[in-house]
Amino acid sequence: MSDILAGRVSLEEFKGLVACGGFSYGDVLGAGEGWAKSVLFNARARDAFQGFFERRDSFTLGVCNGCQMMSNLHELIPGTEFWPHFVRNRSEQFEARVAMVQIQESASIFLQGMAGSRMPIAIAHGEGHAEFESEEALLEADLSGTVALRYVDNHGKVTEAYPANPNGSPRGITGLTSRDGRVTIMMPHPERVFRAVQNSWRPDEWQEDGGWMRMFRNARVWVD
């Protein structure tokens, strides 16, 4: 990030961009706000990121703090006008454990062939509540097919109830994608459970790979 801000590295050299978790800028301006503003208020970085997002051969993944940051950059990302911001969990505490999510039908390049799957995934955040600008924006996000992941309970039903939904997000929403599917954001951590041994239980036929490995392979297939 420092290299991009200083102009030492150009995003034109890359096809993929992944923004990870990590409490950037100490979250002092709000979750992901400082990171996003370092882009929005730097003319060079703003132009670089906007150009990258607009390229038809580029893809982006934002996880946890990266999800929060990307949601604050939605003005630069085509097809994300209904995305929410992510604010303090309704539980008023940091939630770090495993939750269940259901993958929705969407255009996300990462989640192709995975719609309908219900899978355990790691969570670790204090500000994961999806806050939409209005009820209309929430409805439009649903209708536009940009909702990619939802929390579900032990019956496999979408839920807003704690603890199955760790942050109280409306309609269980915890992941979204751009209209064309090239940019995907999610609060949970698929990179922490992509190996079979990272799950407390797994089918024998999984061997080395966990269920979430599919999304990373999907990205490789899309690039090829």
Image (cartoon, rainbow, N blue to C red):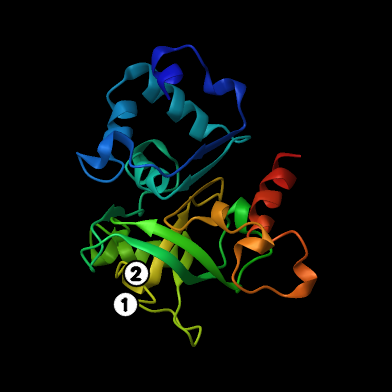
Which residue is depicted at the point 55% across and 54% down? Answer: 192
Calculate the distance from the C-alpha at mark 1 to the C-alpha at mark 2: 6 Å
Answer left or right for 130 relative to 51. left
Q: From what the image shows, is residue 37 above or below residue 144?
A: above
Where is residue 135? Give x, y as percent. Answer: 25, 67
Where is residue 3? Give x, y as percent. Answer: 45, 17
Q: From what the image shows, is residue 61 above or below residue 205?
A: above
Q: Which residue is mark 2?
A: 166
Answer left or right for 45 relative to 126. right
Foreground residue among 148 and 4: 4
Q: Amino acid at mark 2?
A: Pro
Quadrant of the snapshot with the C terminus = top right
The image quadrant of residue 124 is: bottom left
Q: Which residue is mark 1?
A: 162
Query: Can you tell which mark lies on residue 214?
Result: none
The image quadrant of residue 127 is: bottom left
Circles 1 and 2 in contact, beta carbons < 8 Å: yes
